[in-house]
Amino acid sequence: MPLNWDGVFVAAFIPLIVRLVWDHSGLLGKTWRDAAGVNPDEPEWARTAAVAGLSLVFGFLMASIVMPLVIHQIHVFSIVQGDPAYGKEDARVTLWLEDFLREYGDSHRTFKHGAVHGAIAGLCFATPMIAINALFERRGLKYILITSGYWTICLALMGAIVCGWR
């Protein structure tokens, strides 16, 4: 069951691509700019190379963390490592785990599974962080919903790519 670094690299582009669509004036761009207090007369900073480059770096970091959230089998190897306080690993558990992973290891590696878990991360992790910041920054509900929606969609798409990419 190999890790999916190709999918992580592709998923790193998701926040940048979704932001370009999300901010388009015909969609939510004007509403978000108003809610965020962004001056539309300022230069289009989102199209600069530095912002795009940093977005890709941060997107890669996020996708790297999304991988163990959506590919649960990564965690099963901690079972066979054992705990030095209790002695060596149990060979029977190792053999059972190898057989189990050979039979079922990739059964949940689908785009749908990754999208569901990515969306859950967006709703249960990103949304509360955004809401807490927005409350302290005195931003309204519209800002919270638009920004949380953006990150929930990004994490769902990132999860789908990381989990389902083969």
Image (spheres, helix red, strand yellow):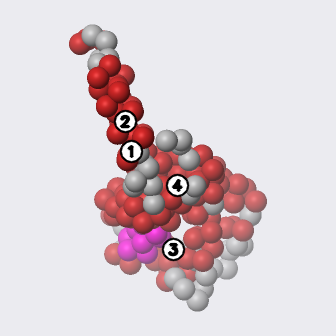
- 147 vs 13, nearest the viewer: 13
In the orientation shown, which residue stands out farthest toward the right? 49
Q: How far apart are the two marked residues, 4 and 3, measured between alpha carbons?
A: 34 Å
Q: Nearer the viewer, mark 2 or mark 3?
A: 2
Q: Which residue matches tag 3?
A: 37
> Quick one: label 4, few (<14), some, or many (20+) residues within 10 Å?
many
Query: In the image, 2: left or right of 56?
Result: left
Q: Is residue 152 magenta-colored?
A: yes
Q: Which residue matches tag 4?
A: 162
- Do tag 4 and tag 3 residues touch (Cβ < 8 Å)? no
Q: Residue at x 55, y 76 (%)?
A: 22
Say which label, 2 or 3, has the lower sequence index: 3
Q: How far apart are the two marked residues, 2 and 3, measured between alpha carbons?
A: 56 Å
Disc 4 residue type (three-letter)? Val
- 95 vs 76, nearest the viewer: 95
Disc 2 residue type (three-letter)? Asp
For the magenta stretch, what is the residue range?
144-154
Say which label, 4 or 3, has the lower sequence index: 3
> Quick one: label 1, few (<14), some, or many (20+) residues within 10 Å?
few
Say which label, 2 or 4, has the lower sequence index: 2
Q: Residue at x 27, y 10 (%)?
A: 87
> Does dot 2 land on a helix, a strand or a loop?
helix
- Do tag 1 and tag 2 residues touch (Cβ < 8 Å)? yes
- Report x, y in % for residue 79: 32, 29
Q: Which residue matches tag 2?
A: 99
> Does dot 3 land on a helix, a strand or a loop?
loop
